[in-house]
Image (spheres, rainbow, N blue to C red):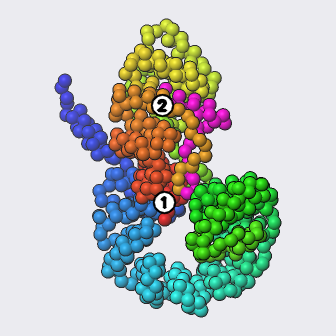
Amino acid sequence: MILNRKTIVLTFILVLFLTTGYGQINLDYFSRQGQKAVLKHNYTEAIENLNVVIRRKNKPFEEYFLRGIAKYNLGDHRGALKDFSQTLSIHPFYTQALHYRGVTYSVLMEKNKAIQDFNEALEFDPYNAKVLMSRGAVYLQMNKLDKALKDLDKAIMIDSDMALAYLNRAIVYKEKEKYAKALEDLNEVLDIDKFNKKAYAQRGLLKYEMGWYEKALADFNEALELAGDNPRFYYYRGLTKYQLNDIEGTLSDYSKVVQLDPTNALTYYNRAILYSQVKEYDKAISDLNRVSQLNPNNVLTYFNRAHLHYEKGNYDKAIEDYTKAIELFPAFAKAYLMRASARAQKGNQQGAKRDRQKGNRIMSKHDNQKGESGSVSDWMDSTYFKKIIEFESKFQNAEATAGGINKKDMGITSEKMFSFRLKKDIKKEDKNRISSFATDFNMKNPLNSTLVVSNTKNTGLHADTLKQRLEKIDSLINTSAPSPNLYMLKGMLHQMLQNYSSAMSAYTMATVNDEDYYPAHINRAVALARMKEEHKNTRGELQDVSLGEDNRLSDNQENSIDYTPVLEDLNKALKINPDIPEIWYNKGNIHLQMKNFTEAVKDYTRAIEKDANYAEAYYNRGLTLIYLQDRHRGCLDMSEAGELGLKEAYKVIERYCDE
């Protein structure tokens, strides 16, 4: 073949364009769009635009910095830390990056590293009031009150309109029990910013501690005018109303807390106490039932609920709860003595005697108290109707349950299994996986649809269309030479129609025609798992493993499904082709359903080894690690999943990694 000069020049230009990889991409445009999105608080959009620049631009320190801000505001603090560090590796004198990395270290409970960054930033800019304020705030967190006060004083001297510096200094003064100065600073905050809800809340807390309950109530009212969806403020106001003997008002505020935050165990517990005081035992029991679901190992929940059952004359339930309390705390003398009373009421004098003896032995051992337990009302007064829990009690589970980017109260679940599916149209937002098998398959696909690897249900194909295509495939099977591809198509169509038995038969025929046809094993495993789960859960949806409030994966139903044949199919697929990441991922999902969490982590890790950009594998491994109390590694996985485009990761990050 002879090439003329024009052809050679054209070829050179084409090669140059292809090798540059972004000849027509305007990086400045994407950078500007990213910056605009950050300013408009559209953080996921910002990350998408900044990713384009970061992947192509040489030394993109500004884009790393902006992406760090976006990740921080999405709650992905570990991802933000990584980006701020990248910024500083390129531009080590970037004061703002040092400042923000210090703030991020502080949020991640790396206080000393935060101080180091603030110190370095102040070497470059010693009169930066914002950095001084941040360092003072971290010193306050470290309980280094004198150092905190020194920094905050200097910050205020440089910038007398910095409301946050006054707010932090007020907290320092409060810790030093200099209430007059604290009150003065909080008043200053509200002079600068009359809409500062935190200042109203802090001033309310200060007045509460000073015993100025009416004035505290007024401040909490102001805070709630500005932030009517803040459960913490309702909680504070409820406690203040309690001090003013407004039981009805306290109950109303507590009800608002649990309406905004249905997983706030402490408020349910406190409301149960109040309901008990006004003799509304059924409501009290209902609240304690909720507490037992949220915190199943809280011994006082069962002990107090037992008292209520006793008062209602439900001695069997009382005995059951006292027994549970004893199981959780075997040295609980009062539970033995109260169970003795309940057993005596049931006529079980022998059991009552044993419990009294056991309870008295424990009491004698610990505090030399002997004798009978006393009346039920004695125990109710001294143990159950205690003074309501106040501010020093930990405000357990008090963060809003909304974990999503749009602040909606949504559940957090694992990503589903992947299988080969047919779709009408391929959309950008679809979670389709790249597959060489699918690419080759589509070159000879007899149907007007595309084979993809997906874990979503929506295919864009109506049931009537699926049936028509099934008829066409059956006709081709009857008139053509045996083909595993045709049986694969038949299986997928049946599976999409939820004809699981027919689907599995078709996949079996595909493997009969070609014993190395691994896609059929993958799909048969998914179809079998779906069939088993839908058989158990007649409401139809796959029962996902989800995160519970105690940062563990919830355990709502007994897992009685036998997943052994599902694993057998996946293992067969791995034997044929161990380099397919989806097989390892699906195997991890099955181990997750079986609660073999360690094996699930191993499988997700293998999937990631095969594909370092497997967002769903990072996500599911992250969930599993959080369940196993390895929050650090779990949150790193979530950060990676979010960076790879899985927006659901930020729900988990905000809810479980924001500490």
Relative depth, front residue between 258 and 266 = 266
Q: CA distance from mark 2 to mark 1?
A: 34 Å
Residue located at (33% from left, 59% from top) = 60
Q: Percent x, y for residue 588? A: 44, 40
Relative depth, front residue between 361 and 491 = 361
Mark yes or no: residue 363 visible.
yes
Residue located at (32% from left, 66% from top) = 88
Badge 2 vs badge 1, beta-carbon distance below 8 Å: no
Does the stretch in magenta take in 162?
no
Earlier sequence position, callout 2 versus callout 1: 2
Element under label 2?
helix
| Magenta-highlighted residues | 522-550
Q: Is residue 512 left or right of residue 395?
A: left
- Residue, disc 2: 564
Q: Quadrant of the N terminus?
A: top left
Mark yes or no: residue 197 visible.
no
Amino acid of disc 2: Thr
Relative depth, front residue between 424 and 489 = 489
Amino acid of disc 1: Cys
Residue located at (52% from left, 81% from top) = 168
Does the stretch in magenta take in 544?
yes
Residue 320, located in which quarter of the rendered image? bottom right
- Above or below, 308 relative to 501: below
Q: Percent x, y for residue 45? A: 49, 54
Element under label 1?
helix
Q: Is residue 498 left or right of residue 99?
A: right
- In the rendered image, the residue lying farthest to the left is 2
Q: Is residue 465 left or right of residue 376?
A: left
Q: Percent x, y for residue 581? A: 39, 37
- Residue, disc 1: 657
- In the rendered image, the residue lying farthest to the top is 479
